[in-house]
Amino acid sequence: MTTTLNPRQFAQRCLLAPDWLLLAQGPGREHAVVLDGACFEAVGPLNELRVRYPDLTVIDLPGKLIMPGFVDSHHHLTQAFGKALVFGEPSEIFRRVWVPMESGLTPDMLYLTAKLASLEALRGGFTTVCDAGTRAAEGLDAIARATTEVGLRCVLAQVCNDRRGSEVLDAAPILARAEQHIAGWQGQPLVTPSLAIPIPEIATDAMLHRVSSLCAEAGILFQTHANEHLVAVERSLEQRGLRPVEHLYQAGALGPQALLAHATLLTPDELMMLRDTDSAVSYNPVASAWKGNAVAQAQMMRSLGIRVALGTDGTRSDGFRLLDYAEAAQRFAFGMAVGDSSCGGGWPWLEQGTLGGARVLGLNTGEIAAGKAADFLLVDLDVPELLPSWDLSWELVRLANRDQIQGVFVAGRLRLWQGWPLDWDARALMREVNELAKSVVSQAPIQKIHPDSTRHREAEQERQYRGAAS
Ligand SMILES: [Zn+2]
């Protein structure tokens, strides 16, 4: 029987009793969780918790699953205005679209684009995103204001490269800004600082080493893009005589603090460099399909003991579709060739999208467990697509959909109910963004290689017409 849920039922402190609870070891029934403010206080069999907490209000959630919120380990929150401009474009979009677009964004615009991206993330079930660092100056405060207002947990990177073309910049102010950034977010529980060098070639080896070491000392994440596509690998070979991961290794920039986005084109030696240094990878399968030319060897990495998280790279913020893509891309790229029909057995993608991601980012989330931050989703399982249910982990990877997410909670607070915020006007934001994005994009010197789909169709029809006439 399904009862109508009221979002106001969810108190600061209560006992949640869903049909299914997604635990670290897999989905469990007859389990419940005690929510206490921003954290989970206890998780265990429902009967035991009822006895242990006789005074707590029990919220029965028939037909529902409580699962950890998704973790997007690689995002660009300030690129939301241009996300639909890049379809069909060849790689290195940053040179033709992102740099021209982002360099024209004022702090107000950065705030709005980051707020739109944050709302999309929550709607897709992400309770945490890791931003790889904006190219726009003064962007960090604007991003943090946006994510915090929306209620999204954010790992926020300060960009620290010291090369601009052939020019080498003074290291001292860059490092001073980095130190300030590391110390600057103490009072903001949803913001975690990080440092980034967007690609290895735009920093000296000394800076790569220094920034990565600063991160290790501070216990934060060092982010970079590495081996994303062939052109990036070949540029690094031309400039440095080394592939990007080899370059990072030689500069002493790898380590448990390092998170490499993409890492799609790795030689066996580079895989071993990641394993031996305990560096982590953000596997971005949708980005591979849309703008890459290879898929990260995520299953191989897992077997080697390399830590892997899932990321969107700002393509689309849809957690369930990301899991599906993560699995499908491994099947297409690697499983089929060797007759591996399970390609990991479903659950690794679910784990990498939740707990694995949280671990890579160094956050106390990603798991429904006592003492963890209460970042979770309330998912409706009472839908035809999940009936009959035989294997919930696999079903969440292949069959579940964003419209089943009833509630999104971050740090124990209900931030979205049935896809919409309860405490601010998302429609007003959408109207404002729509007007602004049109003027920003029309004024930016963006270079698109491919025509839009309507012109593409016209060109094809013209060719067919000419063919018929000749
Ligand atoms: Zn990226």
Image: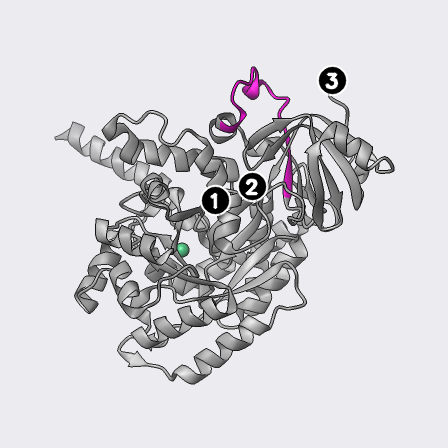
Which quarter of the figure is the C terminus placed in? Answer: top left
Q: Which residue occupies the extreme top position in the image?
A: 388
* C-alpha separation, residue under disc 2 versus residue under disc 3: 27 Å
Residue linked to disc 3: 1
The disc at residue 124 is: 2
The disc at residue 51 is: none
Placement of 236 over or under 309, stated as above or below:
below
Q: Nearer the viewer, residue 220 or 24?
A: 24
Q: Residues within 10 Å of mark 3 (few under 14, many from 20)?
A: few
Determine whether the residue tagged by mark 1 lies in a helix, strand or loop.
Answer: loop
Q: Nearer the viewer, residue 87 or 415?
A: 415
The x and y percentages for residue 315 are 44, 47
User: What residue is at 63 percent from the left and 38 percent from the top?
Assistant: 377
Q: Residues within 10 Å of mark 2 (few under 14, many from 20)?
A: many
Q: Is residue 384 magenta?
A: yes
Residue linked to disc 1: 316
Q: Which residues are magenta?
A: 376-393
User: What residue is at 64 percent from the left and 42 percent from the top?
Assistant: 369
* C-alpha separation, residue under disc 1 versus residue under disc 2: 9 Å
